[in-house]
Image: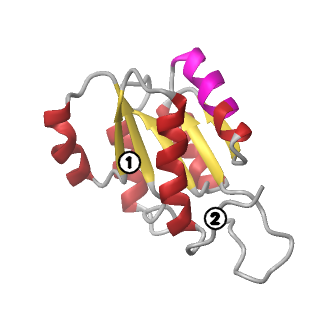
Amino acid sequence: MRIEAPGDRPTRRCLVLVVDDDPDTRFIFPAALEHAGYEARVEADGAAALAAIRSDPPDIVVLDLAMPRLSGLEVLARMKEDPRTRAIPVIACTAVATQADVPDLRSHGFSDILLKPIDPSAVIASVARLSLDALGGRPNPD
């Protein structure tokens, strides 16, 4: 993980990887996250996301489910198989699921599930909850 232990300096911001094939989402979510004090990166498909996650693991992943090359479910499954990435919290973002699908998605290992259309404030709230765990209970530094 990229997060430094409490007391280490300098303290860095929580890194969030946003993965979505929709260009509007790849613009809006990272902009909102950065405005809220997070560091954000973007990828446009599942294969590129998996490569980015393996080369420089983020603290949290915001992951669309329906994408080219590798679906969000396939990305999550491969992350859970890898000891280096299995503990990274993953937020599912989907337009193809309903509230009734949420328990099944959670059973795959998603930390949170957001149903589209998603207000960016919902993404920020979910990331904030998960980043407290990732940062060991410390709020994201500004």
Which residues lie in the magenta part?
A: 22-31
Q: Nearer the viewer, mark 1 or mark 2?
A: 2
C-beta proximity under 8 Å, tags 1 and 2: no
Picture coordinates of residue 60, whole percent (x, y)? 54, 53
- Type of amino acid at the residue the image marks with label 2: Pro
Residue 81 in the magenta stretch? The answer is: no
What label sits on residue 76 in the rendered view? 1
x%, y% of residue 121? 53, 35
Residue 11 visible at all: yes
The residue that appears at 62% across and 24% down in the rendered structure is 28
In depth, the one of 92 and 53 nearer the eye is 92
The residue lying furthest to the left in this view is 100
Residue at 39% x, 20% y is: 117
Mark 1 residue element: helix
- Work out whether mark 1 precedes mark 2 in sequence or the reverse, and give the earlier one: 1
Instruction: Decide: is 63 above or below 55.
Output: above
Please tell me the numbered disc located at residue 130.
Answer: none
Residue at position x 85%, y 76% from top?
9
Q: Quadrant of residue 66?
A: top left
The residue where tag 2 is placed is 139
Crowding near pointer 1: few (<14 within 10 Å), some, many (20+)? many
Looking at the picture, does residue 131 appear above or below residue 36?
below
**Rendered-image quadrant of the C terminus:** bottom right
The quadrant in which residue 111 appears is bottom left
